[in-house]
Each structure stands twice: as C-alpha cells, then as structure tokens.
Image: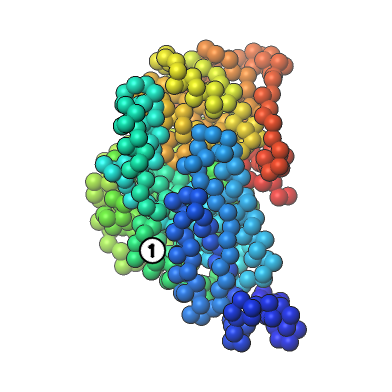
Amino acid sequence: MRSNLITKWPDKASNRSMLRALGFKNEDFKKFQVGIASTWSNITPCNNHINVLAKAAEYGADIFCKSTIFNTITVSDGISNGNLGMKFSLISREIISSSIETVCNAQNFDGLISIGGCDKNIPGCILGMCKLNIPSIFIYGGTILPGKNRTDIITVFESLGKYFSKKIKEKDLLEVEKYSIIGSGSCSGMYTANSMAIVAEVLGISLPNSSIQNAQSVNKIINCINSGKLIFNLLKNNIKPKDIININSITNAIKVISFLGGSTNCILHLLSIIECLKINLTLKNIKEITNNLPTISDLKPSGTFFISDLINSGGIQKFLKFLLEINIINGDTITVTGKTLKDNLKLIKTNYINKLLSCLNFPFKKTNQIKILFGNLSKNGSIGKISGKEGEFFIGKSKVFNSEEESIEFIYKNKIFLKTIIIIRFEGPKGGPGMREMLTPTSALIGVGIKKDIALITDGRFSGGSHGFVVGHVSPEAYEKGEISILINNDIIIIDSINNNLIVFINFKIINLRKKYFKNYSKICYGILNLYRKNVLDSSKGSSFNYN
C-alpha cells in the first residue's frame, strides 16, 4: 500500500502521531487510506451542498477503508460569465486537477473519491484521477431543479437581452432573477456540468445511473454511500483510471454526448483527458466519430426539457442499453464496478423512447448539434453548436470585435444587420488569456430576437447553455496569428455544418498580406493568467497546461 509510507509501524510513528490527532485509531493504520476530494464552496449553488455528499461518501468508505476529506477550489461559471472573472474559469480546471494530484501524493493515499458540481470541477477531478492513476471514483453533485415557471440561469441571461431591447419591463427582469434558481445543484439543462457528468458515467469512472440525479435527493446520498463502499473493491483489485479510460470508452462518451446534444465543452475536456493519457485520438478523429450521428434529445438549451425531466423518465440507462444492442457503443469497456459496461446494463430493459428522447429513425435532428469544422479560417479545427433550428448553412459578412465586452456593448446598443457574422477574437487560451465563454453575447442575441439571422464565431468558448448559429474554439487562435486575426469588417464567411467547413472568402495572397500587418491585441495579464498563457496548449489539444 502506498500509505505504508505514512502508516507503517514503528518506522512512521511521528506521521501516525499526527494522524491520531485527527481521530485515527490503531485499526485505521492497517486499512487502505482514501482521499475524498470535495469541491464544496458557498460561492455557487452548484457546490454548496457537496460537504453533505462528502460526509456520505466518507461514511461508505469507512466501512472497509479509512478516508480523509480534503478540499479543492471551484469557480462559479454562472457568476463569472460576462465579466473578467470568466478568464479564471478554465484555469480552475488545471488548479483543481493539480491540487488533487498534490494532496494525494503528499498524503500517499491509496485511493481517491472526488466529488464535483460546477462545470470545471468534473474535468478537473477526472484529470487529477488520470494524473495520479490510483484506484478512483468520481461522484457528480447532481442537478438543480427548474425555477418558477420552468426557468433557469439561461432564462435570466436571455431575459437581460429582452430587457435591453425593451421587450420586457424592469419588474419582469427582477421576477426572473429572483425565482429562476432555487436550491442546490448544477444548472438544469444539457449544459456543461450535466453533459460532463454523463461523460463520466459512460467513461466508466462513476456508478451506473449516477450522472442523472437531483442534487438534493435521497438517491444522491445513496449514490455517495455506495461509491464510498465501492472504492474498497477497486483497491483490492487494483483497478485504476488508465484501466478504465481508453480510446473505446472515450469514443463511447463522444457518441452519447453527441446524440444527446451536449455541451461543446465536453469535446474540449475530452481532448484534455486524451492529451493527459497520451491516447491516439485527435479532433479530426472526433469529427469522423460524430459526423453522421443524429440528435435524439429535446433537452435544453435548444430543446424543451430539463435534466429533472430526464430523471423522471428513467435516466439514460435504457438509452445506453439500446445503443449497445445496435452496436453503436462498445460494451467491453471496464468500469468502476469491476464489470464491463455491457454487464452493468444486463438487466436494463431497452424501451427508452419518450417525449425527451426520440427514436434514431425519427430524430429531432438528422445531423449532430456538435459540429467539428475545418477550413482556411480554422486550420486546426473549431467546434460549433448548431441545433439546426437556425439552418445548417450560413453565409454572411463579418463584424469584428477584439473582446467580449466590445461585442456585448454593440449588441445591446445597436441595430445589427441580418446575415451578420459577429467575430469575437483574442479570447482564446493565450489571447484572453483563459478562453472565456461567450454566453452573454449569445444570450443577448437571443434576447433581442435575432438568433436565426445572426451567427457568431470566436476563438473563445461557449457555455453549455449557448445556442444559436455559433462556432467557437477556432484554432489557431488570433493571439497565435491564426486566420481569425486578419479578418476585417464585411469579409464574407461561410459556416457549412453539412460539410464541416469554416471558410472566409479571401485568397491566400491577401491573407498573407494582412498577416504582415498583424496587430496583437494582447491583454495585460499577471499571476496565474500569465502562467497559463505561457504554458497552455492549443484548444485543439484541450487547452490544458503543457506539463512536458
């Protein structure tokens, strides 16, 4: 056991003495030592209940092992959106993973249980597990319930656009603000947190059906206790993250999240996991995996239903069983249960079709919402979230902004011509730095009522709650002299989600001429932002730290 380095008698008497002050008994030193990484914080409803979940996991783990709860950070994406705080959101993923790695190695834990709620918690926890490669389980904090009149955080963002365009009054906006978010849990649509929770379950690092649970429910407490119990079996059989996460399980996750119309951030985070584990899978491979898959869910943001509705209809286990039976996903991948995905689904009945999830023969959209686009505007790739309700082909003229703030001010205060493609650049991993989410500008466009006639392209990211004709993650980014950096107003651009193209109608001679006059709108950064800019990888590789 790794933990012998701090528990062995008599060699480690001084270490043991410190642990006794924390309540350790003689028998505890003979057990597997398990770290429980809690992302509890009172700065966001996504995480303000996780201390309760951590205690439940501790209760389960302590039946056979000895567990110790420790904390890592969280950033609230909902609160930091639309301001400079969002620069620190994606960075928090790296801090979370590194802090978990640091504590677990310093304490010589034998195993790890990590619990996450808000968007970057989940990939941060998973990356920490991958870097450690000790027996590990991830627990999702669960989803929040819809607010009054079936509202949520995206309702508030979009209502702001309605208010500035004088479609609603101030009292209406205040009403939406007060009653849209009630209780604890992650944002309630098929946004990034819920999407990544499903990814974790399909990867096999969470218990079956644990990704689709209400945060404040008995089922979530039971899930935490059972996960705590299960860590002993993983330790006994030495099943590690690298035994579970591989090219097959990642391919499964990409397919499932594509069918369900999940967040584009899932692709970014999976690329980061792929980079961490040195798995041979690229953005071009992901394009081939997702290209011919339909969208079968009617879940928000572009659909009608919340995750709580999916919970009430039975979760996703029936859907996974159906995909397994028609050979779309690989059932031979190992999971934290010690069994394969196929074995976990053995007793599940396959009748999943309901008003939320359609039949594959009659999908809500014949093509995928998540589109991987390449072209002379994104040589290394870009990721679009295109529901199809706005069409699948867009041609328009560019309106260029060098920051999110510039674009928001313009959207709220000016009339935008139809068939405009808003360009928001110098918001990439290095250019931001931090690769902010463009939820505020996309919500503003929807709020003012022009989402069908306007597209948006950025080297930044999008929230899982963004929808419309939007393309992000453009790579190379503007800061690195990518082609997005040489665009000027009224350049003609095509977004072709049918053929996966992102093209600006400028010949290569003019592109090269403009690059000679490239001006870098570098934003001043310091501290952790400066460190991130110096070490971050391209978005086509997940925008992770380069640890090599």
Q: What's the residue at 72%, 16% (across, down)?
A: 516
Q: Position of 363 compared to 103: left or right? A: left
User: In screen coordinates, is 341 left or right of 106?
Assistant: left
The image quarter in which residue 6 lies: bottom right
Residue at disc 1, secondary structure = helix
Q: In which quarter of the image is residue 411?
A: top left
Q: Position of residue 458 (x, y in %)?
A: 54, 28
Q: Is residue 302 above or below residue 24?
A: above
Observer-nearest of 49 and 340:
49
Q: Given the image, on which type of amino acid does mark 1 rest?
A: Lys
Image position of 270 (left or right of 148)? right
> In this rendering, does residue 318 appear at all?
yes
Residue 281: tell me if it is visible. no
Label 1, residues with CA under 10 Å away: few <14, some 14-19, many ≥20: many
Outermost residue, right side: 11
The residue under the point 65% across, 63% down is 103
Residue 151 percent location from the top left of the image: 32, 41
Marks counted in the figure total 1
Query: In this view, which residue lies farthest toward the front?
Result: 171
The residue tagged 1 is 220
Give the percent coordinates (x, y) of residue 471. 49, 30
Residue at 71% of width from left, 15% of height from top?
Answer: 517
